[in-house]
Image: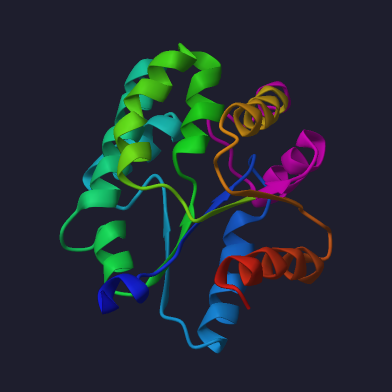
Amino acid sequence: MEENRQKGKFIVFEGTDGSGKSTQMKLLSKYLAGRGLSCVLTREPTDSPIGAMLRSCLSGRIDTDERAIAALFAADRLDHILNPVDGIKTKLNGGITVLCDRYYLSSFAYNGEFVDSAWVEELNRPAREELRPDLVVYLDLTPEEGMKRVARRGECDRYETLERQERIRNRYFDCFRRFADENVAIIQSEVDKMQTQAHIRAAVNRLFGW
């Protein structure tokens, strides 16, 4: 059907904190627009009421258990996918390419570090069955460099310590081995942001067959 041929691509950006996801997403969005594609940027936690509660938990304004945070991420993600007004699937079916800052691999890497990882994966099984990314761009850098970038940003959340970031990075790579059917491009987050972007564009060009 014509609608299926024109369906948008779903590209997810992952990485530890400070890896440059937001900057690289914006650069890629401009590139795709220049290629004539309709493109939107989104993120998790979302701007929904569930997402707002999550950000309050992550910042420490709300003190809650890690299990509650993991469950809120899963709920926010399902609404993000399925919301009939502005959900990801609605956009994709309308021919719009969606760039998303974090998705279920973030839950596996972050939440799975602090609560039972099998439970986190089960929480996110509906999302993974409902919508898999066409491409995951993982921006890699050392936790030490990531924390330097976070410090320059001037704000930290509950996961932003060097020790936690080291463990989270290791969990990401464990996920890449265990979920080998995910289409992951591991891109080094360079000091020169345009050099990083060039590697991202090469992976995206392969996805679109350019």
Q: Nearer the viewer, residue 137 or 158?
A: 137
x, y percent for residue 11: 50, 59
The boundaries of the magenta stretch are: 138-165
- Residue at x 68% of width, y 44% of height: 150
Judge from the rendering whether residue 210 lies leftward or rightward of residue 91; answer left or right: right
x, y percent for residue 51: 31, 43
Question: Taking 10 as reference, is 77 above or below it?
Answer: above
x, y percent for residue 181: 55, 39
**Quadrant where the C terminus lies?**
bottom right
- Residue at x 30% of width, y 44% of height: 130
Q: Is residue 143 magenta?
A: yes
Judge from the rendering whether residue 24 lies leftward or rightward of residue 45; answer left or right: right
The quadrant holding residue 176 is top right
Task: Kindly give the residue lying farthest to the front in the view shown.
Answer: 1
x, y percent for residue 1: 26, 74
**Viewer can see residue 65:** no
